[in-house]
Every structure is written in C-alpha cells, then in structure tokens.
Amino acid sequence: MGEASKIVSVLFRFMQLVSASIVAGVLGTYLHYVSQAHAHKSGRVVYAISIAGIAIFFSLVLMAPLRYSFFAFPFDFAMFVAWMVAFGLLVNLVGSGGCHSNWYWSNWGYYWGRWYRTVPVSAVTQVQVGTGACGRWRAAVAWSFIGGFFWLLSTALGIYVVTRSRDSDGNHTTEVKRREESHMASGVAPNNPREDINRTGAATQDQESAAGLGTSVQNQQVVSCSQCGTANRLGIFVSTLVELETLHYSKISEQYYE
C-alpha cells in the first residue's frame, strides 16, 4: 500500500462525499417543498436521497487512508450498484421528455417553483411552470451517476491494493522459507528467535591426542532453546574445552600418584 494509493483513495472518497452532498441537497430541498404542500413524496426520490445520506456517512468513515478502507471494496461495489439504481429511477421519472415531460412540470417544477402557494396542481399548466428548475434536476441526476462512478473506482483500487498486498506477503513468506532451508542445509542456525533447534555437538580426539594419551572423548549435548545462535554455540565450545582440560589434569594426577 504505497503513498500514491492512499492519495488516490482520499481523492475518490472526497468526490463521493461531494457528489452525495449535492444530490442530498437538491433532492432534500425538493422534498421540503413537497412537505410544505402536504403532497405525496415520490418513492424514487426518497430512495435516491437515502442512498445519498448513506454515501455521505461512509465516505467520511472510509476517507482516512488506512488499511481497512481498501478492504471495504465489496461495500464500495454495493454502493456503486445502489447509485446506479438511483440514477436509473430518477431518469425514468422524466423518461425521454426530460425537462419537458409531464412529471417534471407537474411535480418537480411545480413544487420547486412553489406554485402550490398560489395555484392548485390541477390548474397549473406547463407554460406557467416552465423549465426554470431544470438545471437543479439535471444536477441531481448527473451527480448521482458521478457518485456511483467514484464508488466503482474505489472498488477497483481496493481490489488492486489488497491483491498486491497478498502477493507481497506470499512472496515474503516464500523467501523466508527458502532462506531457512538454505541455512539448515549449510548447518548454520537461522536467525529466527521463534524456532526450537536441536543440535548434537561432538568433540573427539582433541587435546588428548596431542598429549599422546590415546583417549577419545566424545561429548554430546542436545540444545533445545527458543534463541539459538552464535552465543549459544560459543558456550558449548567453551564447556567442551573445560571438560577436556579437567579430564587432562585428572589423567596427569593419576599418573603422578601411581
């Protein structure tokens, strides 16, 4: 997980926050006017503003460039799907007519222009309402699509970072195992404090052969420890020398008293 991935992730989350805020602001204002008129709220608009609210919350939660935000790519994909559904529902409200459709001037334009204060909805005409609020409607639809697109980008980024991280961990584990096998084959203790190493050391025909004693001394020591390295092997060597010297002097003492 490099610095570039973190920066890009924060940028995507920021754009998700911006898009959701715009959609929530525009649709929220429309629903406020509908509530003032005590009229029926469109379920499609309610769904879209609900997704916008969820997106605002989770874009803030996931904005921190931490490891957990990249592992949230399944949720990112779910948000992408939810936004695409919201986009489709909003577009379907006006159909191919756009801002000249019947729903636009009798619902969106009517309530956004606050015609309900002076003219009943049954008496209003398309000419009266016009297309003054068309820009706000288009902004809500466009930013719902843009928001979903950035959630899709976060999905792709999360998959990339997680896959790359797992590959890196796997390569590191393989390299560690290879080094351990190489150490064991060469007889060198691996520098791993968590391993238990059993070693048998033998010291035969050392100083006694040089002294002509003809005595072979073999010392076997089994070392089982959690931290075996150079210091431990040096201790074994010193202990062996002490035992050999002790045996040497005992032989000399026996010959002297005889």
Image (cartoon, grey):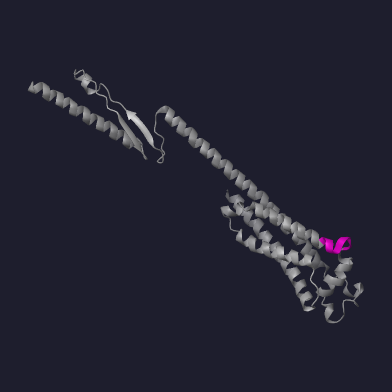
Quarter occupied by the C terminus:
top left
**Residue at figure coordinates x 80%, y 64% from the top left:** 138
Please state the horizontal and vertical placement of residue 7, each as a whole percent of the image.
61, 54
Query: Can residue 132 be seen in the rendering of this structure?
Result: no
**Residue at figure coordinates x 49%, y 33% from the top left:** 178
**Residue at figure coordinates x 38%, y 35% from the top left:** 197
**Residues drawn in magenta:** 91-97
- Specify whether residue 188 is painted magenta: no
Residue 118 is drawn in which quadrant?
bottom right
Does residue 30 lie above or below 83 as drawn? below
Please state the horizontal and vertical placement of residue 33, each as a whole percent of the image.
78, 75
Does residue 10 lie above or below 119 as drawn? above
Residue 202 located left or right of residue 132: left
Does residue 166 lie above or below 70 as drawn? above
Residue 202 is drawn in which quadrant?
top left
Q: Residue furthest left?
A: 257
Residue 246 located left or right of residue 218: left
The answer to which of 113 and 85 lies nearer the viewer is 85
Residue 124 located left or right of residue 176: right
Please state the horizontal and vertical placement of residue 67, each as a whole percent of the image.
57, 52
Please state the horizontal and vertical placement of residue 168, each as a whole percent of the image.
56, 41
